Amino acid sequence: MSDPNAPQFWQDSYRNGRIAWDLGHPTPVFARLAKSGDYLPGNMIALGAGRGYDARLFAQHGFEVLAVDFASDAVVAMHQLNDPQHPVQVLQADMFKLPESMNGRFDYLLEYVCFCAIDPTRRSEFAALAARLLKPGGLYISLAFPIGRRPGGPPFVVQPDAVIELFAEHGFTLHHREFPPDSIPSRQKIEELLILRRTGEET
Ligand SMILES: C[S@@+](CC[C@H](N)C(=O)[O-])C[C@H]1O[C@@H](n2cnc3c(N)ncnc32)[C@H](O)[C@@H]1O
């Protein structure tokens, strides 16, 4: 099974320990954002959340977080690692099939090593998903990784300028971008923080 659209592909990766992307802790970049006070706690959805390190981080800073993943071992890990003082709501689902009742419900959408995990032909669908899930004014927070050149995937390369252009077609404007000084050493300069604001009406 080598189809990244299928939950079994990811489930097999978790089951076989082929999870080189898994940091075992939240990225320091999101840790800085969460404690900066620049982003007030609100409703957040974390897509392709994996074992949920980043989702739990934001929950610990007062955000109401819904973490979505379709691989059962990732979901089991999120339940096991959940912090009862600051629980994350965990949902096992294909993000592309999230119900319309979730439209416009979130102030923030968090993405790390998820955009690069999906089939590149679905990137426009992903941007449309972000547009429908976020409230007008809501923020898409992405640590775009991996930048550069590499054949195939996942992870499939991400070009931040192309992401900004694609999301603009779905009603987003650039709020902030940076090469984070606090990326983990092996990801310095190959990941870029992109924060895009969803403007306008439903797309
Ligand atoms: C490379 S892992 C990254 C996990 C996590 N964000 C991290 O940084 O550790 C990508 C995750 O996205 C999930 N995923 C991929 N496509 C998905 C989909 N259509 N719906 C829900 N989850 C998906 C996979 O199961 C996997 O856990």
Image (cartoon, rainbow, N blue to C red):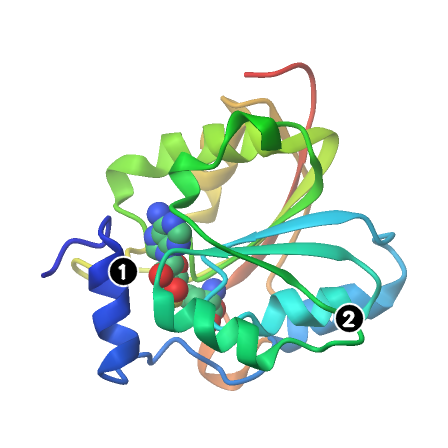
Q: Amino acid at mark 1?
A: Arg
In this rendering, does residue 190 appear at all?
no
Disc assigned to residue 149? 1
Residue 157 picture quarter: bottom left
Q: Nearer the viewer, residue 47 or 97?
A: 97
Looking at the rendering, the quadrant in which ligand 1 lies is: bottom left
Q: Which mark is residue 86?
A: 2
The N terminus - image quarter: bottom left
Give the quadrant of residue 107: top right
Compared with residue 167, is residue 81 higher up or lower down, i.e. above or below?
Answer: below
Q: Residue at x 66, y 77 (%)?
A: 28
The mark lying in front, picked from 1 and 2, is: 2
Q: Is residue 72 above or below residue 20?
A: above
> Is the residue at mark 1 in contact range of ligand 1, meaning its CB lies under 8 Å from it?
no
Q: Amino acid at mark 2?
A: His
Locate residue 151 relative to residue 162 in the image: left or right: left
Residue 18 location (% of width, % of height)? 25, 81
